[in-house]
Amino acid sequence: MRFTPVLFLLLPLGLSAQSRNEQVRVLNDIVVLMDAASRLNQTYYFDTEQLAKAIYESRERVNPNYFYSSRSRNSGTVYYTDLEKAFRFPELKPDANQHLPAYMADLIPYLEAREKVQLLLKNKKYSALSQVVSAATAQYIAVTDSLFQAHAQLADYISGKAYQADEKFRAAKALLQRNSRCFSACHNASADLYQLIERYFRDQLPPYPTHAAVRLAEQEMALSMQLLDQWQQELYAGNDTENQVHDAAIRQLNIQGLSKDSLYLYKTRGYGKPNSGWWPHTRYRTFFTSMHSTLYWYIGERYSSYPYLKSAQQHYNKFVLSYNQIVENYNRFTEIADGKTFTTTSSCCLGPTEIDTNQNVLLTKPRLLYRYDFVDTEAPVSGSPPSSTISDTLYPKAHAAMIAHAVPHHLIYLLDASSSMQAAGKLSQLQAAAKYLVELQRASDHISMVSFATKAHILLNNQPCDDKPAIHAQIDRLHALGSTNIDAGMRSAFGLADSSRFTQGKTKILLITDGLFELDKTSRKLLKRAQEKSVGFSIIYLGYVLTSEQEKELRALCVKAGGQFYNASEIDLRAILVQEASQ
């Protein structure tokens, strides 16, 4: 939120309150699009899982009873007034009687939301916003549409009974492999898009200092959402070692949130008059109490072992089921801050003192997408693939374009390799993100890497990014063991910056750590000299929730060196690295 003070000073000259709220509504419309896609994603996941199950259970002899999908279960048609307006979408194909197959009708909310967002982003009124999110939104739509196409092929395969002539289910397995890639691409595109949205909202459209009660309550709820987001990232990466820790933390936040309810929301204002605060109070409590019937059972849930499904996939999808219900309750609370939307959705039950016309629209959050990983149960078991190969990764086009248009850069990674980095998959997350960026970087870009624990070690020294296998191999050698000697790491990193003399472009040092630290006098002098020598210095934090004072201290260090602070629990690490490399 570095631009908040400047933004408020400029409001009378440029960005009016109405303009700010309208822009946030556009961002929320994109989230509506993402939510519509997530509901289809859920349906498509269950169809994909069912085909995998049908293949496994039909190995000896095809049993048609196993092969079914949302299309075969929902074979009727729908027709009612105004539905024909949706026939403008080429994806919808009504029959000769102008009736729409029921399974196609499920597409309409997504198609309408997609159309609305595309029109909004073409509107010159939102040109500044469009420049930031248009490319990522277009990429998101492209990969989401590809999932729909893949699912259509899967549904055709089942409804057309192609499995009866499919020798060894080769065609079915090819469909499942394609779906697996599409599910992964959708997850990445969704994460990238929302990180851009969240960052733009935080830096350019922060909430006004009004509606103090609602804002304080939302901040309390956001602590739980931040923890849940960190949890889901770990589960997606296949790491469930921190489940008990997160479960204890979320229960404590739950207790604290409910105890603070009366302090935040005992009174709100509508039309300038005090009222009971019934709406925000009810939705706030619903957010917390709903966890008792959703998330709390996740830890104690027992999982069946299915050979055709990966265990990590099952764990993650069970978590998604709870998360999506919780995020919907979070969004229902934030809706209160938007008097315009709130009036529309709750008009049946509102009194004149229950709507605040001084709107302070808040950003909503998207639902999570289900995960599917193809498993060939008849494939021979082999050793693990080399961890350095990521040639199959589907890179977001927006990231590739950002690196392609960036000036050459020398990134010096200053990596915390203390023992705590082993927890919660932080080290593996860091390795994957670093290799992701290396695949996008050019021969003119250079990389150095210093790890620090009890001692500092130089793993890469001003290495051009054209020899990607060699760089991947060094990244894979990273391990976490020992205490945290950050000052030794600082001296090594700044020594590399001084000795490399990278004159073709920019040099940046990226400190990546999961803990708080104290710098000695020498390290603080290095920070001061960094800006003088045009060496960038940014901090990427991978740890648990910071207090406002702790975050303020870390941001101050970055400002001193002319860099930025990032909290990787709020922004995907890959997106952070791409941004640092391209700016």
Image: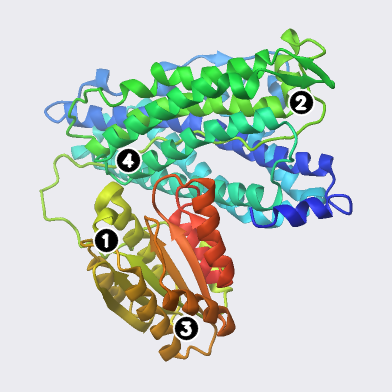
Q: Earlier in the sequence, mark 4 or mark 1?
A: 4
Q: Position of residue 149 (x, y in %)?
A: 47, 40
**145 is higher (above) or lower (below) than 351:** below
Which residue does the numbered mark 3 point to in the structure image?
A: 444
Q: Position of residue 419 (x, y in %)?
A: 24, 57
Q: Earlier in the sequence, mark 2 or mark 3?
A: 2
Give, as a three-letter code, the residue at label 1.
Answer: Ser
**Nearer to us: label 4 or label 3:** 4
Which residue does the numbered mark 2 point to in the structure image?
A: 339
Marks 2/1: CA distance? 49 Å
Which residue does the numbered mark 1 point to in the structure image?
A: 418
Q: Are marks 1 and 3 in contact (CB under 8 Å)?
A: no
Q: Earlier in the sequence, mark 4 or mark 3?
A: 4
Give, as a three-letter code, the residue at label 4.
Answer: Leu
Can you tell which quarter of the image residue 277 is in?
top right
Q: Is 275 in front, or is 570?
A: 275
Secondary structure beneath label 2: helix
Which residue does the numbered mark 4 point to in the structure image?
A: 235
Bin the neighbour count of mark 1 within 10 Å (Cα to Cα): few under 14, some 14-19, many 20 and up: many
Q: Position of residue 140 (x, y in %)?
A: 54, 47
Give, as a three-letter code, the residue at label 2.
Answer: Gly
Q: Are marks 2 and 4 in contact (CB under 8 Å)?
A: no
